[in-house]
Image: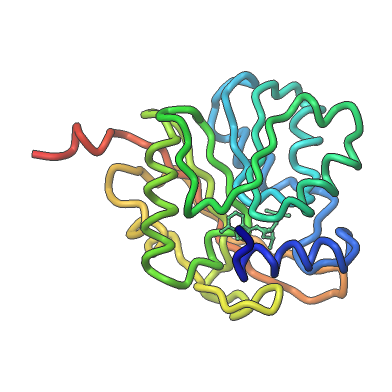
Amino acid sequence: MTSPRRSHWDDVYTTKQADTVSWFQDDPTPSLDMIALTGLGKDAPLVDIGGGASVLIERLLDRGHSDLTVLDIAQAGLAVARTRMGERAALVTWIAQDVTAWQPLKDAFSIWHDRAVFHFLVEKADRVAYMRALDQGVSVDGCVILAPFALSGPERCSGLPVRRYSAELLQAELGQRYALIDQKLQTHVTPSGNRQDFIWCLFKKTQTLAAAEP
Ligand SMILES: C[S@@+](CC[C@H](N)C(=O)[O-])C[C@H]1O[C@@H](n2cnc3c(N)ncnc32)[C@H](O)[C@@H]1O
């Protein structure tokens, strides 16, 4: 079924060149640095949430990562990446799905990566649903990389309102079973030259919900 959210993003990817949108980056070094910081091997199952047309997955394949999944609400965004990658696209699992409705296999991933997606979830119910998917999909000792706009970042992205975060606010969303390992503020320069502050946080899952419950 087509939701307004899905239509918005499919429209973006069908009407704009992928390298002109504000979030475009040809060098995903902040993501690569955080993924390296997890200390996990190249065979660690990684999911890029809302990966869209990002080049991150190609850079990870270049570095030898072998278990990669990209989930995005916009089939059109995934199609841009798949077309660009040609035969290499077959090395990746592609899922066209709203993350808030996703039910990943339990413990399927040891790295959850999200750049500029979680901040669109301005409704509490959506954030709860996102965290339910995350907690189901990420195994204990797995890592979660979240990179929304920082408190000093823009109030909107792609014409939509966003929620801005500090590491403490992200910690509150994840709960205490996720330990903050690292954080950094990063300024992204958009293709049109605007500056956008992101907060990058790396968390480690320390416990299942069941183990934490009395
Ligand atoms: C600002 S773009 C960031 C794309 C990519 N992560 C990057 O860094 O280049 C946001 C992406 O999240 C996707 N998205 C937005 N809401 C989503 C949702 N609820 N579930 C899955 N993907 C979503 C959009 O289609 C889009 O590709």
Q: How many marks?
A: 0
User: What residue occupies the far front of the structure in this picture?
Assistant: 1
In the image, taking residue 155 as reference, residue 16 lies left or right, namely right
Q: Is residue 91 above or below residue 10?
A: above
* Residue 177 visible in this rendered orientation of the protein: yes
Which residue is found at the position 75% from the left and 21% from the top?
64
Which residue is found at the position 48% from the left and 67% from the top?
165
**Quarter of the rendered image showing ligand 1:** bottom right
* Residue 189 visible in this rendered orientation of the protein: no
* Residue 144 rendering spot, x and y as whole percentages: 48, 42
Nearer the observer, 103 or 52: 103
* Residue 119 rendering spot, x and y as whole percentages: 54, 66
Nearer the observer, 19 or 145: 19
Quadrant of residue 106 in the image? top left
Q: Is residue 106 above or below residue 98?
A: above
Which residue is found at the position 79% from the left and 35% from the top?
59
* The C terminus lies in quadrant: top left
Q: Is residue 34 above or below residue 188?
A: above
* The N terminus lies in quadrant: bottom right
* Residue 170 rendering spot, x and y as whole percentages: 41, 59
User: What residue occupies the far left of the structure in this picture?
Assistant: 214
Q: Is residue 204 above or below residue 126?
A: above
* Residue 14 rendering spot, x and y as whole percentages: 85, 63
In the image, taking residue 137 as reference, residue 76 lies left or right, namely right
Which residue is found at the position 71% from the left and 64% from the top?
9
Quadrant of residue 87 in the image? top right
